[in-house]
Amino acid sequence: MQSLKRRERSLDAGGALIHEGQTDAPLYTLQQGWAFRYKTLSDGRRQILNFLLPGDFIGVQQKMGDAAAHGVETLTAARFCVFQRDALWELHRRSPLMGFNVTWLTAHEESMVDDTLLSVGRRSAEERIASMLILLFKRAAALQADAGAGGVAFPLTQQHIADGLGLSLVHTNKTLRKLERRGLHHIADGRLHLRDVKALARLADLWGDGRPPQRPLV
Amino acid sequence: MQSLKRRERSLDAGGALIHEGQTDAPLYTLQQGWAFRYKTLSDGRRQILNFLLPGDFIGVQQKMGDAAAHGVETLTAARFCVFQRDALWELHRRSPLMGFNVTWLTAHEESMVDDTLLSVGRRSAEERIASMLILLFKRAAALQADAGAGGVAFPLTQQHIADGLGLSLVHTNKTLRKLERRGLHHIADGRLHLRDVKALARLADLWGDGRPPQRPLV
DNA sequence: CGACAACTTGAGACGCTTCAAAAAGGGTGG
DNA sequence: CCACCCTTTTTGAAGCGTCTCAAGTTGTCG
């Protein structure tokens, strides 16, 4: 894997890693920080497809030599590992195990998008937010040793939450406040605390639990 | 690839290939017919994640030895090719090229879900339907030689369209009729005709065009 | 202290949902 | 070939969840 690595790239918070429609973007691995993939319509409406945390793979979706179908932007300062575009084939050829892992990672990311699609298509605003909070909490918690105590790092603004759930900023704010006043969660100083996971899970109709599956490292 | 094949399986229209939550479902390849992946909430609300056409791969999303995160049902009579669960790793090991193709296919499917998520999250009902009609038309047309002439095969009911776009059945019907009365499309006898692709594309804000990318065969 | 981004809150409008019911097909058995 | 059932499509009407518009407040950074 190391031999295919080209170089590293660091971005500040709010930086654009890949522009929508950019051609020939390389492949990346997110090493540190948070980011997200998104698409926009020509009048500016934006949908965030999913959030990226350390360990995530970036850019497999775009067909070789084609324009990127989505943009990628950072939420925090972040460091990426850069691979050349055709490294994907090289990687499969040189290490089937790594290739298998990439397939796994891609499939796993798709299943996260599936979850969001279910939310956006069929859940109410309250339910969507409850669902997102739980899912993001789990992912963030899996990455930090002292999970739970002071909550987990949570660098999203309400605009990001809105764009990730297909809601307007205003309604997102009102719903978030409602849940908070009910004592289900609390967000402050860039940290998310879940005050009543049971209630949130019930709201979101999220039976699934279990720790996040052990992910392969690439 | 053939050596990993276990057997075939045929289903009538409306048959369940994989039940939601089923454990240890095998891997499949769709050889003939149409199907779809879906998820449901406990109160019955259903979201169709994407539609499956011949050549699509099924089941990579579920983590090994885990419960299926989504169900799969047929829209028409269909024939599937069955592989055992761990064939995925075997396949990568024995043929990196095939492994690469599976990664490609998985990534491609994710990008279709991405498109739908953009629709469901940010497009109006009219726009969503226009977008789905164009995208499905292209996929169906790519599979039949005489595309265009008498339209393409289109086995979805309005309920499927609704569930795929996060809309209610009633509103889907009204919107569909509105577009049809405006002369944008026509659906009859299980065939879809696009009467004004330009107008549909403009409505859906779909600049992308081009023939569907040449897909690897697995 | 000024400027700018993020968060809050209120109010009215509208798109979509739900409820209800009828019409149109499509298949099956008598 | 008709009577019947069940699925799919169609239409109307009322309600509400979410959106848009419009300020105001709070927090942060230079």
Image: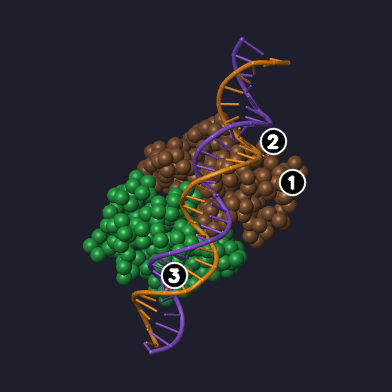
Chain colours: A green, B brown, C purple, D orange
Residue wearing tag 2: B189
Q: Position of residue A170 (x, y in %)?
A: 45, 64
* Label 3 SS: strand
Could you tell me which chain the residue with mark 3 belongs to? A
Q: List x then y, in percent, for residue A93.
A: 48, 57
Nearest to N terminus: mark 1 or mark 2? 1
Question: Which of pointers 2 and 3 indicates the residue nearer the eye?
Answer: 2
Q: Are marks 1 and 3 in contact (CB under 8 Å)?
A: no
Q: Amino acid at mark 1?
A: Gly
Residue pointed to by mark 1: B148
> Is disc 3 on the same chain as disc 2?
no
Check disc 2 and report its element: helix, strand or loop.
loop
Q: Is residue B132 left or right of residue B22?
A: right
Category of crowding for the residue at label 2, using alpha-carbon neighbours closer than 10 angstroms: few (below 14), some (14–19), many (at least 20)? few
Residue underneath mark 3: A74
Label 2 close to label 3 by CB (< 8 Å):
no
Amino acid residing under circle 2: Asp
Question: For the N terminus of chain A, which image quadrant?
Answer: bottom left
Give the residue displayed 42% in from the left and 43% down from the top: B41
